[in-house]
Protein backbone atom coordinates (compact mmCIF):
# COMPACT_ATOMS: atom_id res chain seq x y z
CA UNK A 1 0.00 0.00 0.00
CA UNK A 2 1.15 3.53 -0.76
CA UNK A 3 1.17 6.33 1.79
CA UNK A 4 1.16 10.11 1.83
CA UNK A 5 3.54 11.35 4.52
CA UNK A 6 2.59 14.71 6.02
CA UNK A 7 4.59 16.70 8.57
CA UNK A 8 2.74 18.99 10.97
CA UNK A 9 -0.40 16.95 10.38
CA UNK A 10 -2.06 17.56 13.73
CA UNK A 11 -3.32 21.11 13.11
CA UNK A 12 -3.73 23.97 10.65
CA UNK A 13 -2.88 23.42 7.00
CA UNK A 14 -1.17 20.12 7.78
CA UNK A 15 -4.35 18.63 9.21
CA UNK A 16 -6.20 19.86 6.12
CA UNK A 17 -3.60 18.21 3.91
CA UNK A 18 -4.16 14.96 5.77
CA UNK A 19 -7.92 15.20 5.25
CA UNK A 20 -7.50 16.12 1.60
CA UNK A 21 -5.23 13.16 0.88
CA UNK A 22 -7.43 10.77 2.88
CA UNK A 23 -10.47 11.95 0.91
CA UNK A 24 -8.58 10.81 -2.21
CA UNK A 25 -8.13 7.34 -0.65
CA UNK A 26 -4.46 7.71 0.26
CA UNK A 27 -3.26 6.05 3.42
CA UNK A 28 -1.66 8.60 5.71
CA UNK A 29 1.52 8.89 7.75
CA UNK A 30 0.74 11.78 10.09
CA UNK A 31 3.72 13.34 11.88
CA UNK A 32 3.68 15.95 14.63
CA UNK A 33 4.93 16.79 18.11
CA UNK A 34 1.34 16.82 19.41
CA UNK A 35 0.79 13.19 20.32
CA UNK A 36 -2.75 13.32 21.70
CA UNK A 37 -4.06 15.39 18.80
CA UNK A 38 -2.38 13.02 16.33
CA UNK A 39 -4.44 10.18 17.79
CA UNK A 40 -7.59 12.23 17.29
CA UNK A 41 -6.64 12.92 13.67
CA UNK A 42 -5.99 9.22 13.05
CA UNK A 43 -9.35 8.19 14.51
CA UNK A 44 -11.17 10.91 12.58
CA UNK A 45 -9.63 10.08 9.19
CA UNK A 46 -9.97 6.33 9.56
CA UNK A 47 -13.64 6.61 10.54
CA UNK A 48 -14.57 9.12 7.85
CA UNK A 49 -12.55 7.88 4.88
CA UNK A 50 -11.71 4.27 5.71
CA UNK A 51 -7.97 4.72 5.21
CA UNK A 52 -5.06 3.52 7.31
CA UNK A 53 -3.42 6.23 9.37
CA UNK A 54 0.02 5.71 10.89
CA UNK A 55 0.98 8.33 13.48
CA UNK A 56 4.53 9.31 14.34
CA UNK A 57 5.22 11.48 17.35
CA UNK A 58 8.39 13.40 16.53
CA UNK A 59 10.07 16.71 17.29
CA UNK A 60 10.72 17.80 13.72
CA UNK A 61 13.12 20.52 14.88
CA UNK A 62 15.66 17.90 15.96
CA UNK A 63 18.56 17.51 13.55
CA UNK A 64 18.01 13.75 13.22
CA UNK A 65 14.20 13.89 12.86
CA UNK A 66 14.19 13.06 9.14
CA UNK A 67 16.40 10.01 9.68
CA UNK A 68 14.17 8.77 12.49
CA UNK A 69 11.11 9.06 10.25
CA UNK A 70 12.79 7.40 7.28
CA UNK A 71 14.16 4.53 9.37
CA UNK A 72 10.75 3.82 10.88
CA UNK A 73 9.09 3.82 7.47
CA UNK A 74 11.71 1.36 6.21
CA UNK A 75 11.46 -0.90 9.25
CA UNK A 76 7.65 -1.04 9.00
CA UNK A 77 7.63 -1.48 5.23
CA UNK A 78 5.70 1.73 4.58
CA UNK A 79 5.79 2.63 0.87
CA UNK A 80 5.85 6.44 0.79
CA UNK A 81 4.58 7.72 -2.55
CA UNK A 82 3.94 11.33 -1.50
CA UNK A 83 5.87 13.58 0.89
CA UNK A 84 4.23 16.81 2.05
CA UNK A 85 6.71 18.97 3.96
CA UNK A 86 4.34 21.27 5.80
CA UNK A 87 5.50 21.64 9.42
CA UNK A 88 6.46 25.18 10.32
CA UNK A 89 6.42 27.90 12.94
CA UNK A 90 6.07 31.67 12.84
CA UNK A 91 7.70 33.90 15.44
CA UNK A 92 7.42 37.68 15.36
CA UNK A 93 10.69 39.19 16.58
CA UNK A 94 13.67 41.07 15.21
CA UNK A 95 16.76 38.91 14.90
CA UNK A 96 18.78 40.42 17.72
CA UNK A 97 15.87 40.02 20.15
CA UNK A 98 15.31 36.38 19.27
CA UNK A 99 16.85 33.70 21.44
CA UNK A 100 19.52 31.73 19.51
CA UNK A 101 17.80 28.48 20.49
CA UNK A 102 14.59 29.66 18.81
CA UNK A 103 16.51 30.53 15.66
CA UNK A 104 18.06 27.06 15.59
CA UNK A 105 14.61 25.53 16.00
CA UNK A 106 13.07 27.36 13.07
CA UNK A 107 16.07 26.70 10.80
CA UNK A 108 16.08 22.99 11.64
CA UNK A 109 12.32 22.70 11.27
CA UNK A 110 12.01 24.50 7.94
CA UNK A 111 15.34 23.80 6.26
CA UNK A 112 17.20 20.83 7.74
CA UNK A 113 14.32 18.41 8.22
CA UNK A 114 12.66 19.29 4.90
CA UNK A 115 15.92 18.89 3.00
CA UNK A 116 16.76 15.56 4.58
CA UNK A 117 13.25 14.15 4.14
CA UNK A 118 13.50 14.97 0.44
CA UNK A 119 16.95 13.40 0.35
CA UNK A 120 15.92 10.10 1.92
CA UNK A 121 12.54 9.63 0.29
CA UNK A 122 13.64 11.24 -2.99
CA UNK A 123 16.16 8.45 -3.46
CA UNK A 124 13.44 5.85 -2.91
CA UNK A 125 11.19 7.62 -5.41
CA UNK A 126 13.97 7.78 -7.99
CA UNK A 127 14.59 4.05 -7.71
CA UNK A 128 10.84 3.41 -8.01
CA UNK A 129 10.42 5.82 -10.93
CA UNK A 130 7.52 7.74 -9.41
CA UNK A 131 6.61 10.00 -6.52
CA UNK A 132 5.43 13.45 -5.53
CA UNK A 133 6.90 16.03 -3.17
CA UNK A 134 5.11 19.13 -1.90
CA UNK A 135 7.07 21.83 -0.05
CA UNK A 136 5.35 24.62 1.85
CA UNK A 137 7.15 27.91 1.28
CA UNK A 138 5.45 31.31 1.76
CA UNK A 139 4.71 34.57 0.01
CA UNK A 140 7.32 36.02 2.39
CA UNK A 141 9.99 34.20 0.36
CA UNK A 142 9.87 36.99 -2.26
CA UNK A 143 10.95 39.98 -0.17
CA UNK A 144 12.84 40.78 3.05
CA UNK A 145 10.41 40.95 5.97
CA UNK A 146 11.51 42.84 9.10
CA UNK A 147 10.24 41.29 12.37
CA UNK A 148 10.22 37.82 10.74
CA UNK A 149 13.61 37.93 9.01
CA UNK A 150 14.48 34.41 10.13
CA UNK A 151 11.12 33.01 8.96
CA UNK A 152 11.19 34.74 5.57
CA UNK A 153 14.77 33.63 4.95
CA UNK A 154 13.98 29.97 5.62
CA UNK A 155 11.01 30.20 3.27
CA UNK A 156 13.25 31.76 0.60
CA UNK A 157 15.56 28.77 1.05
CA UNK A 158 12.63 26.42 0.49
CA UNK A 159 11.64 28.38 -2.62
CA UNK A 160 15.09 27.91 -4.15
CA UNK A 161 15.42 24.34 -2.90
CA UNK A 162 12.10 23.20 -4.36
CA UNK A 163 12.88 24.77 -7.73
CA UNK A 164 16.31 23.16 -7.94
CA UNK A 165 14.99 19.81 -6.75
CA UNK A 166 12.39 19.81 -9.53
CA UNK A 167 15.17 20.03 -12.11
CA UNK A 168 17.03 17.17 -10.46
CA UNK A 169 14.09 14.79 -10.15
CA UNK A 170 11.36 15.49 -12.71
CA UNK A 171 12.98 13.43 -15.46
CA UNK A 172 12.73 10.39 -13.16
CA UNK A 173 8.95 10.66 -12.85
CA UNK A 174 8.95 12.70 -9.63
CA UNK A 175 7.09 15.99 -9.31
CA UNK A 176 8.18 18.71 -6.89
CA UNK A 177 5.63 21.42 -6.05
CA UNK A 178 6.26 24.55 -3.99
CA UNK A 179 3.28 26.31 -2.37
CA UNK A 180 3.41 30.04 -1.56
CA UNK A 181 0.45 30.93 0.68
CA UNK A 182 -0.20 34.36 2.09
CA UNK A 183 -2.05 35.06 5.35
CA UNK A 184 -4.00 32.08 6.69
CA UNK A 185 -7.23 32.55 8.64
CA UNK A 186 -6.29 31.24 12.08
CA UNK A 187 -6.71 32.56 15.66
CA UNK A 188 -2.98 33.34 15.61
CA UNK A 189 -3.67 36.84 14.26
CA UNK A 190 -5.87 37.77 17.24
CA UNK A 191 -8.53 39.42 15.07
CA UNK A 192 -12.27 39.58 15.62
CA UNK A 193 -14.44 37.07 13.77
CA UNK A 194 -16.01 39.92 11.82
CA UNK A 195 -12.65 41.27 10.66
CA UNK A 196 -11.38 37.82 9.75
CA UNK A 197 -14.53 37.21 7.73
CA UNK A 198 -14.03 40.54 5.94
CA UNK A 199 -10.42 39.66 5.14
CA UNK A 200 -11.53 36.28 3.77
CA UNK A 201 -14.13 37.93 1.53
CA UNK A 202 -11.53 40.40 0.26
CA UNK A 203 -9.04 37.60 -0.33
CA UNK A 204 -6.50 39.05 2.09
CA UNK A 205 -6.75 35.84 4.12
CA UNK A 206 -7.52 32.29 3.03
CA UNK A 207 -8.75 29.32 4.99
CA UNK A 208 -6.37 26.45 5.70
CA UNK A 209 -8.78 24.11 3.89
CA UNK A 210 -8.68 26.18 0.72
CA UNK A 211 -4.89 26.35 0.71
CA UNK A 212 -4.59 22.60 1.23
CA UNK A 213 -7.03 21.85 -1.60
CA UNK A 214 -5.16 24.08 -4.03
CA UNK A 215 -1.81 22.71 -2.94
CA UNK A 216 -2.88 19.09 -3.43
CA UNK A 217 -4.51 19.87 -6.77
CA UNK A 218 -1.31 21.52 -8.03
CA UNK A 219 0.83 18.65 -6.74
CA UNK A 220 -1.27 15.95 -8.40
CA UNK A 221 -1.14 17.88 -11.66
CA UNK A 222 2.63 18.01 -11.43
CA UNK A 223 2.87 21.79 -11.23
CA UNK A 224 6.16 23.31 -10.07
CA UNK A 225 4.58 26.04 -7.95
CA UNK A 226 1.26 27.44 -6.85
CA UNK A 227 0.33 30.69 -5.12
CA UNK A 228 -3.20 30.29 -3.70
CA UNK A 229 -5.48 33.30 -4.00
CA UNK A 230 -5.61 36.30 -6.32
CA UNK A 231 -4.59 38.79 -3.63
CA UNK A 232 -1.49 36.75 -2.75
CA UNK A 233 -0.62 36.38 -6.44
CA UNK A 234 -0.71 40.15 -6.81
CA UNK A 235 1.41 40.66 -3.68
CA UNK A 236 3.98 38.10 -4.82
CA UNK A 237 4.10 39.62 -8.30
CA UNK A 238 4.73 43.08 -6.91
CA UNK A 239 7.25 41.86 -4.35
CA UNK A 240 9.22 40.00 -6.99
CA UNK A 241 10.05 43.27 -8.75
CA UNK A 242 10.00 45.68 -5.81
CA UNK A 243 13.44 47.05 -4.81
CA UNK A 244 14.26 46.33 -1.18
CA UNK A 245 14.93 50.03 -0.52
CA UNK A 246 11.22 50.72 -1.04
CA UNK A 247 10.47 48.61 2.02
CA UNK A 248 12.98 50.61 4.05
CA UNK A 249 11.26 53.80 2.90
CA UNK A 250 7.86 52.62 4.11
CA UNK A 251 9.29 51.52 7.45
CA UNK A 252 10.71 55.02 7.98
CA UNK A 253 7.51 56.88 7.11
CA UNK A 254 4.87 54.66 8.73
CA UNK A 255 4.93 55.25 12.54
CA UNK A 256 3.09 52.03 13.56
CA UNK A 257 5.62 49.90 11.70
CA UNK A 258 8.50 51.81 13.22
CA UNK A 259 7.07 51.35 16.72
CA UNK A 260 6.60 47.65 16.06
CA UNK A 261 10.24 47.26 15.08
CA UNK A 262 11.34 49.07 18.22
CA UNK A 263 9.19 46.81 20.37
CA UNK A 264 10.05 43.33 19.02
Image (cartoon, rainbow, N blue to C red):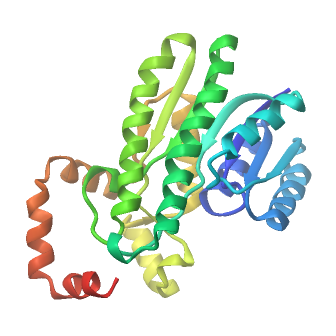
Vertical placement of 101 versus 154: above or below? below
Left or right relative to 174: residue 58: right
Q: Nearer the viewer, residue 12 or 66?
A: 66
> Relative to 41, does residue 5 appear above or below in the rendering?
above
Residue 33 horizontal/vertical position (percent): 73, 61
In the rendered image, which quarter is residue 85 located in? Answer: top right
At 83% from the left and 52% from the top, the residue drawn is: 45
In the foreground, 101 or 32: 101
Q: Quadrant of residue 208?
A: bottom right
Quadrant of the rendered image containing residue 160: top left
Residue 66 at x, y percent in the picture: 67, 41
Q: Quadrant of the N terminus?
A: top right
Quarter occupied by the C terminus = bottom left
| Residue at (9, 63) in percent of width and height | 246
Along the viewing direction, whichever of 115 and 126 lies nearer the viewer: 115
Seen at 57% across and 20% down, the residue is 174
Question: Whole-percent x and y of residue 228?
Answer: 43, 50
**Residue 212 position in % (x across, y down):** 58, 50
Q: How many marks?
A: 0
The residue positioned 62% from the left and 36% from the top of the image is: 117
Side of 26 relative to 213 (left or right): right
Amino acid sequence: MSYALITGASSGIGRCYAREMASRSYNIIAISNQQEILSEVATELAAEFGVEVVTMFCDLAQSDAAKQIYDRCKSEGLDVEIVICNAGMLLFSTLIRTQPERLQTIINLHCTTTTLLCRYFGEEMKLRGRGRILIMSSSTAWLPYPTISHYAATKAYLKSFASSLWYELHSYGISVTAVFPGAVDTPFYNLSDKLRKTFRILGVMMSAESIAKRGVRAMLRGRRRVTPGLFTKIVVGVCAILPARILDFFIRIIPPVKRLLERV
